[in-house]
Image (tube, rainbow, N blue to C red):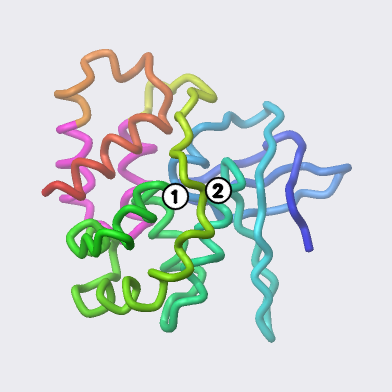
Amino acid sequence: MIAHLSGTVTAAGPTWLIIDVGGIGIRALCPPATAAAVRVGERSTLITSLVVREDSLTLYGFSDDDERDAFELVQTASGVGPKLAQAIVSVLNPQQLRTAIQTENLAALCAVPGIGRKGAQKLVIELKDRIQLLAVEATAEAPTGHAAPVWREQVSEGLQGLGWSGKDAEAACDRVAAAHPDAEEMPVAQLMRTALASLARS
């Protein structure tokens, strides 16, 4: 089991990173906010979860233990695979997920691409007793990097990678730009969270 990766980021996309660990480039799929928070050429650490299938080994990377735990927990529900689990933790942080399950907030769960009302109800039923395993306290989000001038492209690509349409992604970027005139000076991870929150409300 690979618990974490530490090394130099050699390449990055909207939902993936490649980290050089001892001369070996290891690719990890990540939530958009995690991928956007790092810079190529700088060192980074990812908390990881290895998904083993008959024909593949896929590594998923996260910013902290709580996010990784949430990713693994939601996969214990029937019908939730790694791709949908990644979308869930991209839209809802661990505390938001726990609150949504405990309060049966179906609207919050339906904000995740790929989850309809019936799917949200199933998640509530299957996870309500297990959601206690997640951390009680929400962790404060600390800036881990500075947004590049192309923050809008990064945020839009990340949202589309999660399943939103290009139109929805651009509309979310417009709302972020309106809410944060200083967006170019803010961490892309924070801008991504704002965009996801605006889509959840729309």
Residue at 22% of width from left, 60% of height from top? Answer: 105
Which of the two residues, 12 or 58, is positioned nearer the viewer here? 58
Say if 104 sits above or below 99 in the image. Answer: below
Hey, what amino acid is under mark 2?
A: Asp
Q: Is residue 36 magenta?
A: no
Residue 35: x and y, percent?
A: 52, 41
Q: What residue span does the magenta drawing correspond to?
A: 152-175
Q: Secondary structure at mark 2?
A: helix
Q: CA distance from mark 2 to mark 1?
A: 6 Å
Residue at 45% of width from left, 46% of height from top? Answer: 14
Residue 3: x and y, percent?
A: 74, 53
Residue at 27% of width from left, 70% of height from top? Answer: 115
* 63 sits left or right of 109 in the view: right
Dot 1 corresponds to which residue?
Answer: 94
Residue 119, picture quadrant = bottom left
Which numbered tag is attached to residue 66?
A: 2
Hey, what amino acid is under mark 1?
A: Pro
